[in-house]
């Protein structure tokens, strides 16, 4: 009797386990079907999604094209401005020089307009003109190279001759025939000079 009861209990448990397993299989099947339905969109939905992606891509392409056109226009304007600046530099590069030179020309014209000028007044006029020229050159960044009694510098001086001189060290500038000039530290004309050399001793 007891053995039969145990067999019945085991049969009931097996039946319940099978039922539970079948229910689980059904749930899994339903869930899988739902997932498949969720992931499988209708053709209309796919079309709408592709159309939206196409519109976004077209909008981005239009934005990039507009940016390109603006950048190109800016570069064209910059190129035109640079070309104009170069042309103006070639045309009006000496404008500052001309403005500095005009007062000197005015002073010379005024001096020549004076009648019966004495030699002394003419000399004063020349000295004044020379002073104005010196001021003009200073404003333009031009400096004199007057190396008298200085060491000979081949980069700024041009030796015209050499002369023995026991009073100074060899390679000293003892005479300046023509002054040199530099423009903003760039040599535009070397000074023409006479340079000393050692005196040869008599045997």
Image (cartoon, rainbow, N blue to C red):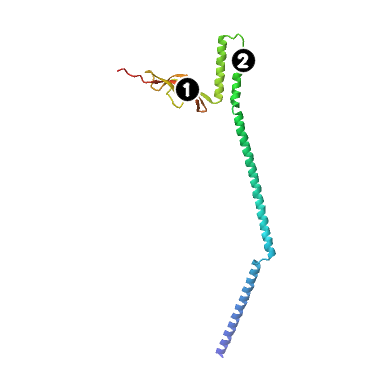
Q: Secondary structure at mark 2?
A: helix
Q: In the image, what residue occupies the spot 68% across and 62% down?
A: 47
Can residue 147 be seen here? The reply is no
Q: Is residue 173 left or right of residue 60?
A: left
Give the position of the N terminus as an image quadrant.
Answer: bottom right
Q: Give the mark, 1 or 2, whose residue is nearer the N terminus.
A: 2
Q: Is residue 11 left or right of residue 59?
A: left
Q: Secondary structure at mark 1?
A: strand
Q: Is residue 187 left or right of residue 12?
A: left
Mark 2 surroundings within 10 Å by alpha-carbon count, few (fewer than 14), some (14 through 19), many (20 or more): few
Image coords of residue 196 (percent x, y)? 40, 20
- Cα separation, mark 1 vs mark 2, equals 32 Å
Q: Which residue is at the front of the view, 11 or 68?
A: 68
Give the position of the C terminus as an image quadrant.
Answer: top left
Mark 1 surroundings within 10 Å by alpha-carbon count, few (fewer than 14), some (14 through 19), many (20 or more): many
Q: In the image, what residue occupies the spot 45% across and 23% down?
A: 158
Image coords of residue 12 (percent x, y)? 59, 84
Image coords of residue 99 (percent x, y)? 61, 24
In the figure, residue 197 lies in which quadrant?
A: top left
Res. 165 mark: none
Q: Which residue is at the front of the view, 4 or 154?
A: 154
């Amino acid at each position: 009797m007891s053995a039969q009861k145990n067999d019945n209990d085991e049969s009931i448990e097996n039946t319940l386990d099978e039922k539970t397993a079948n229910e689980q299989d059904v749930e899994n099947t339903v869930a899988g079907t739902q997932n498949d339905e969720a992931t499988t969109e209708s053709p209309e939905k796919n079309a709408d999604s592709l159309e939206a992606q196409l519109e976004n891509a077209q909008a981005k392409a239009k934005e990039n094209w507009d940016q390109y056109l603006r950048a190109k226009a800016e570069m064209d304007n910059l190129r035109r401005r640079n070309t104009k600046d170069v042309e103006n530099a070639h045309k009006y590069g000496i404008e500052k020089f001309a403005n500095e030179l005009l007062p000197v020309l005015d002073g010379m014209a005024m001096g020549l307009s004076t009648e019966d000028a004495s030699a002394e007044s003419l000399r004063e006029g020349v000295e004044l003109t020379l002073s104005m020229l010196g001021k003009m050159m200073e404003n333009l960044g031009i400096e004199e190279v007057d190396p008298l009694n200085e060491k000979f510098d081949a980069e700024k001086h041009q030796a015209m001759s050499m002369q023995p001189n026991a009073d100074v060290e060899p390679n000293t500038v003892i005479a300046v025939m023509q002054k040199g000039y530099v423009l903003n530290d760039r040599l535009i004309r070397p000074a023409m000079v006479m340079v000393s050399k050692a005196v040869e001793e008599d045997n």
